[in-house]
Structures are given as C-alpha cells and as structure tokens.
Image (cartoon, rainbow, N blue to C red):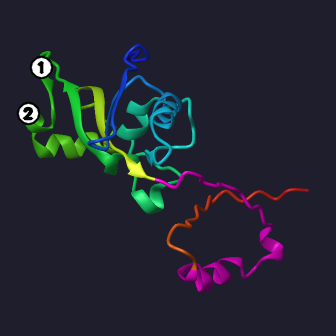
Amino acid sequence: MLDLSNLNEIKIDLKEGTVWVQAGATLGQLYYAIAKKSKIHGFPGSVCFSVGAGGIISGGGLGSLMRKFGLAADNVVDARVIEVNGDILDRKKMKEDLFWAIRGGGGASFGVILAWKLKLVHVPEKVTVFTVFKKLDSNQNLLQKWQNTSHQLPDGLSSEQLSKMMDRE
C-alpha cells in the first residue's frame, strides 16, 4: 500500500479547460480548487469528498454528473504513471492501451499513477441535488411512471437511482 496523500497539488488551466490533479488530492480538494477559480466549471467525480482523486478515477468514477458528462475516467485527457523501473510515462509515452487500462481498470497493477489531467465540464452556476424516498409498496407503478415521463423532462435534469431499498418503519 502506498500513501499518496502528500501528492495533492492541483493546477487549473481555465483557458484550456483542464486541471492537473495529483493522485493524493481528495475530491473535496479538487472541487474546492475548481470552485475558487470558476463558477461554471466542474468535474464529474463522486459525491464522497474524502476519497482520493486517484482512486475514484482508477475505479471508473461514478458520480452525480455522470448521466450528462460521463464517468470521471471518461474525462481524463492525460496521466503521469511511474513504472516499476522508475520511468515516468505520459499518455504519449504509455501508448493508448495502457492509457485505456488505467482509466477504470484499477490502475495499481500497471504502475503508480502520480497525476491525472482532467477535462473540466461546463455546469450551471447553481446546481440542485435532492433525494426522494418512496416506499415501494405504496408506489407499485413508480418505475413505470418514470419510464413514461422521463424522456419529456429538460435535458439538464438527470436522475440517479440507487438500488438499495429500505423498509422504514
């Protein structure tokens, strides 16, 4: 196990619309750095702010913005990986097969990922996220209703369904 927490530098280039984030930075640090620079840029990572950026991206990166912008790994444009012999590779040096493999394949078996270059996405200045809990027994046709109406909703609205159903008393 490697402790990458000291590799937490974040460099944002709004003109290019990208950010270099070292693998030890948390998503919270990344989101905060982006928010300090811009009100209309974001990154489609996860909702768990304490998770390391390197880990969430290496695992694919499910998040609230994935329906509109894809997974976190889909927004990677470059990376720096150190191989077992000490060579540091970027996208060009590692070739496309390795670049594909580190984005969602759990990059640890391919070397140590030091940093990711991420594409920033354009988001509205205000975004609202909410959760609605419904008991399944009183909403037997809830999924059917959603399927019949969701295609009529505005493009900017997305939903995320968690498959964990809890019977609350």
Residue on which disc 1 sits? 87
What residue sits 50% from the left and 32% below the top?
36
Residue range corresponding to the magenta coloring: 123-152
Q: Quadrant of the N terminus?
A: top left
Q: Is residue 85 above or below residue 75?
A: above
In the picture of the structure, the residue carrying the numbered disc 2 is 93
Residue 81: where, in percent of width, then height? 21, 27
Instruction: State which quadrant residue 113 falls in.
Output: top left
Across and down, in percent, residue 153 comes to 57, 78
Q: Amino acid at mark 2?
A: Lys
Q: Residue shown at 21%/46% (left/top)?
A: 100
Q: Is residue 130 left or right of residue 77?
A: right
Task: Please provide percent x and percent y for residue 77.
Answer: 24, 43
Mark 1 and mark 2 residues within 8 Å of each other at the beta carbon: yes
Residue sitting nearer the eye, 39 or 103: 39
* Amino acid under disc 1: Asp
